[in-house]
Image (cartoon, coloured by chain):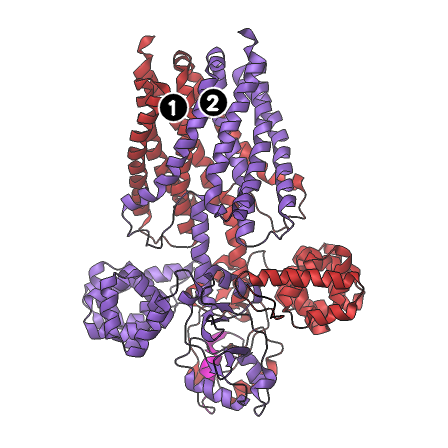
Chain colours: A purple, B red
Amino acid sequence: MNDNNTELPSVQRTSREELRELVRSQLQALLEQNNLKGAKALLVPVQPPDIAEAIEGLPETMQAIAFRLLSKEEAIEVYEYLDSSIQYALIEEFKRQDVLDIVGKMSPDDRARLFDELPAKVVKRILEQLSPQERQTTSLLLGYPPDSAGRMMTPQYIAVKENMTVTQALDRIRKLAHVSEIIYYLYVTDASRHLRGTISLRDLVVSDPEQLLSEITRREPVFVSTETDRKEAARLIQRYDFLALPVVDSEQRLVGIITVDDVMDVVEAETTKDIYALGGVASGKENYFQTNIFTVARKRVVWLLILLITNTATSAVIRAREDILEQVVALAAFIPLLIDTGGNVGAQSSTVVIRGLNINAIGEGKVWRTIGRETAAGSLLGIMLSLIVTIWAYFLAGNLLVAISVGVSLLAITFLASFAGSALPFLFDRLGFEPTLMSAPFITTAVDVLGVLIYLTVAQQLLGGAE
Amino acid sequence: MNDNNTELPSVQRTSREELRELVRSQLQALLEQNNLKGAKALLVPVQPPDIAEAIEGLPETMQAIAFRLLSKEEAIEVYEYLDSSIQYALIEEFKRQDVLDIVGKMSPDDRARLFDELPAKVVKRILEQLSPQERQTTSLLLGYPPDSAGRMMTPQYIAVKENMTVTQALDRIRKLAHVSEIIYYLYVTDASRHLRGTISLRDLVVSDPEQLLSEITRREPVFVSTETDRKEAARLIQRYDFLALPVVDSEQRLVGIITVDDVMDVVEAETTKDIYALGGVASGKENYFQTNIFTVARKRVVWLLILLITNTATSAVIRAREDILEQVVALAAFIPLLIDTGGNVGAQSSTVVIRGLNINAIGEGKVWRTIGRETAAGSLLGIMLSLIVTIWAYFLAGNLLVAISVGVSLLAITFLASFAGSALPFLFDRLGFEPTLMSAPFITTAVDVLGVLIYLTVAQQLLGGAE
C-alpha cells in the first residue's frame, strides 16, 4: 500500500483504484487552478481507460476542458472508453471538425455502438459529415438487428489469398496493421470473397518465408453469420479459445470479424440481463443514472402486478379456509415461514437450472436427471427442515397439532417447490419462452397457492374436529 | 438449416449443435460396429472441443476407446477440453506412459487445474513421474492460494531484453512459439527479471528490423501480483482489452502471464458463483452431476435455517397481534401478498446494487445517489401499487378498513424494502462482507418483520376500535 514512491499507474491490488482517484483529484485541483500545462503533464503516463475514468469523475464543466488537453491520438482512444452520456455531452460541446476527427477515426463497431445511443438527429448530422466510405461501413453495421453478430463485428480484418507466400502475407500485415482491429489472424478468401480458412500470425511467424499460404491454411473455419445472436458468437469464442471469429453474409462471403475484447463486454451485458431478470428487473441498455426513476419504476411494476394477480388465488384459498383460521388463529403466524421457504427452495432449484441453461451446461438427455436430482435434493431438505420446524413451531405455538400441520405442509411445499423450480425453466425453454424471465412468477404462484392450500387443509383435518 | 451438403463443423446458428449430436451418434454407431477405422476417419475434420463433447456423450465403456483413436497431438488438445470427471476416468484406464505423455504436454496452468480436481493420491503418482522441470512448474502453480492470479497464470511467455533488435526478437519468437502459450506480447525484463515493459507482436511487425526494442517498448505496464484475486485480473484484462496480463512476484519479478481465454472461463465461473449466491445456493467447484444430493442439500440448508430463525421474529410479531387477527380474520388473507411484494421490491433494488458492485459500475460518491434513486423508485412503485391494492383488497375482502390497512402497509413496506435492498449491500461491502451472499437474508428479515408489524399495527389502529 505504499503508493508514495510511484507515480505510474502500476497495479498492485486495490492500489490501482486509489491511484485512479488520485489522478482524478489532482486533475481537478490543477484545472481549478487553471494550470493546464500541469494537468496535461499529469495525464501523459496514464492509460486511456484510466484517463476516461478520471474525466468521468470531474464536474461537468471541466470534462470538456480536460478532454481537450489530450493529444488527438489519445483523445480518440479515451473517447471510446467514455460513458455514452459523456460522449454525447462532449459532442455537443465541440465544434464540428473536432467531432468528425474523433468519430471518423473510431473503429466502425464502436462508432455503430455510439450511434445506437445518440439521438437520431445527432447521428444524422454526424453521418452526413463522414467520408462516404466511413458512412457506408457505419450504416451497414447499423442495418443489422440489435444483438446480432453483424452489429458487433468490425470490417477491419486482413484478408489474404491462398497463392501468396508467407513473406507477402507479412508485408501485407505490415501495410494494413494500422487500419486492422487485430492482426493475429489472417482470413483466406477466394476470388469472390468466400471464406476458405484462417492462418494465425503464429503459424506465419514460424513458417518458412517462401511457403505458400495454401500449405499452412487451416481449413473448415468456425464462423457465424451476420444474423447470428451475439450470445452464440460469444459462446463460440469462449469454447474455442479464439481471439476473433469471422462473420459471413448469407452467401458465405466474409464481411467482418468479432474480437474477443468485444465478446467480454457482451458476456458482461448478457449476464447483467440474466441477473436482472432473475431479480425481477427489466433491463434496458440505458445508463442507470440517466434513466429517470419513473422509467425505472415502470419497468419493475409489471412483475409486481403479476404477483398481485397471482396473490388473488392465494387470498382466495385463505379466505375459503377462514373458519379454521378463526378457530386457531395461531396458524396465521406460520404463513410467512411457509411462503418464504417455498419461495426460496424454488429459487434455489430454478437458479441452478436457469444458469445451466444459459451457459449450455445441461446436455440433452440430462433434463429428467436434473429435475430428478433437484426434486430429490429438495425433498431431502424438506425432511430435515420439516423435523426442525415441527419442534420449533411446537415451542412457539404450544400446540402439537398446529406444529404437525406446519411440519407436514413444509415437507409438501419443499417437494413441490423443488419440482416446480427445476421443471418449469425446462418447460419454458422447450416452449420457446425465456426461462430467466418467466420462471419466477410461475414458481411463486404454484408454491404460494398450493402451499397455503396444503397447509390450511392439513390444519383443518387435524384441528377442525372441534367444529 | 440444410446441413446435408456439408460435413464440416461449420457454424450456422443452432446447426452446430445438431452437428455435434450427429458426430456423437455416428461415432457411437461406428464403435458399436467395432469399425475403428471409420470412427477415426469421422473425427479427422472435427475440432478438438467438439471431439471432447462427442466423447463426453458416449457410454462410459466407449470413451477410452474413442480417445485412443486420436493422434497423440490431438489427444492432448482434446484432453484439456474434457470434463474433469472424464479426464480422471481416462487416467485410471490408461497405462502410465500414455498418461504421462499427455499430462506432461498439457500447459502448466491447465495441468494445475486438472490436479486441483484429482484425488491427492493420483496427483502424487503423476507428479512423481513428470520431468523435474514440469514437476517444478506445476507444484509452483499449485502453491498459490485458490482463485489467485498465481494459480491461473502460465509460465509460458516470451521474455526479451531491451538491447535486442526487432529481428532478434522475431527470431526468438520463432524459436519459442511452440512452447509459449501466446506469442502476441513480448515482455521486456532487466537482468534480474524485473518487468520493464511490453511489446506487442503488432508493434514488432510494423517496426524497422534494425530498431532496438528499447525504442518500441511500452513502459509502465499494467500487471498483477501472484496473490491478486483472479476476479481483479479478469477485470483488468477486460478493462484494457488485453490479450494477456503479466504476473509478478512479491519482488516485482515477472513469473507468468494470464491469457484472455482463461479469463473468460473465470468470468463465467465467478458469475455462476454470484448468481448462485443471489439464489441462495452455495456453490462448489464440483461438477453438478457428480455431487451427491446429500451434499447438495447440505449446501442449501444453511440459508433456509437462517430463514427459519428470522421467521421466529415474524411469527412473534403475528402472535403479539393475535387479538386483531382473531377479530378480523380476513387480515390473514393479505399476509402473503405483503410478504411477497416486500421481498420482490427488496430483491429488485438489491439485484441492481449487487450487480453494480460486482462489476465495479458504481463509482465512489455515487453510493448515496444510488440509495436515493432506489428508494425513490421503490416509493413510486409503492404509491402505484398501494392504490391498486387498496381497491383490489376492498373487492376481495369487502371491508374498507381492511383494504386501507393493506394499502397503507404496502406503501410503507415498499419504501422500506427498496431502502434496505439498496443500502444493505453497500453496508456489507463497506464492512468487508460479501454483499452477494449476505444481503438476501437480512433484507428478507427486515421486510418480513417490519412489514407484518406495520400491517397489523395499522389494522389494530383502524379496526381495533371494536374491542
Between tags 1 and 2, which lies in front?
Answer: 2
User: Residue A272: x, y in percent?
Assistant: 43, 52
How many neighbours does mark 1 have within 10 angstroms: few (below 14), some (14-19), or many (20 or more)?
A: some
The range drawn in magenta is B188-212
User: Residue A138: x, y in percent?
Assistant: 33, 71
Q: Which residue is mark 1?
A: B453
Q: Nearest the camera: B361 or A127? A: A127
Q: Chain of mark 1?
A: B
Q: Is residue A195 left or right of residue A283?
A: right
Q: Chain of mark 2?
A: A
Say which amino acid is labelled 1. Answer: Leu
Say which amino acid is labelled 2. Answer: Val
Q: Nearest the camera: A223 or B133? A: A223
Residue at 43% x, 65% y: name it. A262
Q: Which residue is mark 2?
A: A317
> Which dot marks residue B39?
none
Residue A18, above or below A399: below
Residue A175, above or below B415: below
User: Residue A182: x, y in percent?
Assistant: 45, 76
User: Residue B157: x, y in percent?
Assistant: 56, 74
Q: Is residue B69 visible to the viewer in this orientation of the structure?
A: yes
The quarter of the picture where the N terminus of chain A appears is bottom left
Residue at 51% x, 66% y: name it. B260
Q: Is residue B33 left or right of residue B319?
A: right
Q: Is residue A86 left or right of residue B21?
A: left
